[in-house]
Image (tube, rainbow, N blue to C red):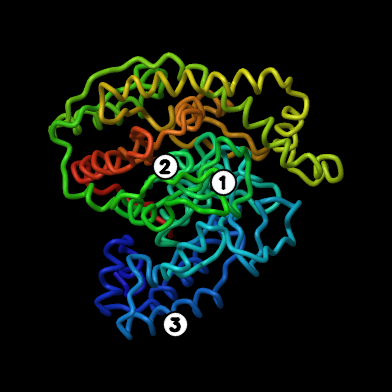
Amino acid sequence: MGKFDELLSFDVAALSNKLRAKEISPVEVTNAYLDRIDKFDEKLLAYITVTPQVAREAAHKAESEIAGGHWRGPFHGVPVALKDLCYTKGILTTGGSKILDEFVPDFDCTVWARLRDAGAVLLGKLNLHEFASGATNTNPHWGTCRNPYNLERVPGGSSGGSAVAIVAGMAAATIGTDTGGSIRIPAAFCGCVGLKQTWSRVSRYGVIPLSDSLDHAGPITRSVRDAALMLQVIAGHDPNDSTSSREPVPDYTAAFERDAKGMRVGIIKQLSAGTSDEVAHSFNEAVRQLKAIGAEVDEVSMPTTDTASTIATNIMWAEAYEYHEKWMRTRPDDYGPDVRRMLEAGMHAPAINYVRSQRARVRSLAEALNALDKFDVLIAPTAGIAAPRIDVGGRALMPNGHPVNMVSEVLRFTAPFNVTGLPALAIPTGLAPDGLPVSMQIIGRPFDESTVFQVAAAYEQARGPIPAPKLA
């Protein structure tokens, strides 16, 4: 293993310890990541914008501060990257679209401002499905992002670049966004950890919206501990975001001092059926491992999950069109075909669908909270399939060449927890026989990310490492 490869092998928790101890420097770590991006991103297309000068300046500053004994915390000197929905002052922020191909904000979004103030180093801005409006990350404007485990497969979306950068060793941690599953889907398809925390736990100020009442911005990382460390930095009330919660932020690292013995885990009946054989086998093995480490596992029925994807899309289309209404009147041809169709659906959707869908969210949340009265966490597959193929027309295909319905095979599993706003963490359960990652999600009570981390970390340790992709 070369020096650069060794530097890239550390998760944030390990890297932070070495940086604080001055065993390695932020400058050499940053250069290792920039070298990796130069080497592999031409074929993976995880980045829209790389910021080497910004990164090196921040790395030198971090090195000087740490050497002087001014350590800011676990992200000091750690190279990160942001989904290109996140405003960054003086840096191109495209939303993955032609509409904003020259847009340079004059302020930072709160998520990045908090990471910046914690000493993080910005490597650049990450590829996504245009305006976060799809699950494949096939982007007609900035290029189709590729899955590191198989370049002919989708990485998932909309935060595909955020997951690819993690798994390909092109960032130590990343930020994605999740409206119907857009953090968890790419985490599942690419084999990393993705957290959609409780809605309102993290400010969305300065993050280009898809659907205001469903959107989340959160971590995509290598490990459960890294997700907890990142949430610790970005969580908390923001006066610039009136929807951000004032709920106190606990010490998430305390969750790692506890195991899963005696934890009550509920398998969601409606979401454990209808998956591929590979997903079902891996999920059942994860259940076996949870039982082996002392968790008490049983089944729970949540019928409203069957309608959650319809509820989510009704809300999403209407709220997305409200944001895009001006551009749809003046620049409709500048959208990709699939995103334009979604926005047109929002334009023509009856208001009654939106009102009834918002009302249905209350019933879904009540049902989920009732289930969580009996269990500490709930579990389900993150997606019903492994990553499908990329078709030249931008659709996703199964290995037999049949087009896959991404709503039924993916959104069905993730959207229920955008509808309810509950925290949900995607964690790999292994690789399918064809070498593609598969995943489960762990769901908790509102603002109880700590228990989600506790169960996820115990499972992660029992599962062991996932083989990395072989990038030539």
Marks 1 and 3, how far apart at CA: 36 Å
Nearest the eye: 143 or 380 = 380
Which amino acid type corresponds to the residue marked 1 in the rendered image? Answer: Ser
Q: Earlier in the sequence, mark 3 or mark 2?
A: 3
Q: 307 and 147: which one is in front?
A: 307
The residue at 22%/41% (across/down) is 463
Q: Residues within 10 Å of mark 2 (few under 14, many from 20)?
A: many
Hey, which residue is sitting farthest right in the picture?
A: 330
Is 344 drawn above or below residue 360 in the view shown? Answer: below
Q: Which residue is mark 3?
A: 60
**Would you identify the image quadrant in which residue 333 lies?**
top right
- Image location of residue 34, percent across then percent down: 48, 71
Q: Amino acid at mark 3?
A: His
Q: Which residue is mark 2?
A: 197
The N terminus lies in which quarter of the figure?
bottom left
Query: Residue 124 vs residue 438: left or right?
Result: right
Q: Which numbered mark, 3 or 2, is in the foreground of this view?
A: 2
The residue identified by callout 1 is 242
Q: How far, Cα to Cα, is label 1 from label 2? A: 17 Å
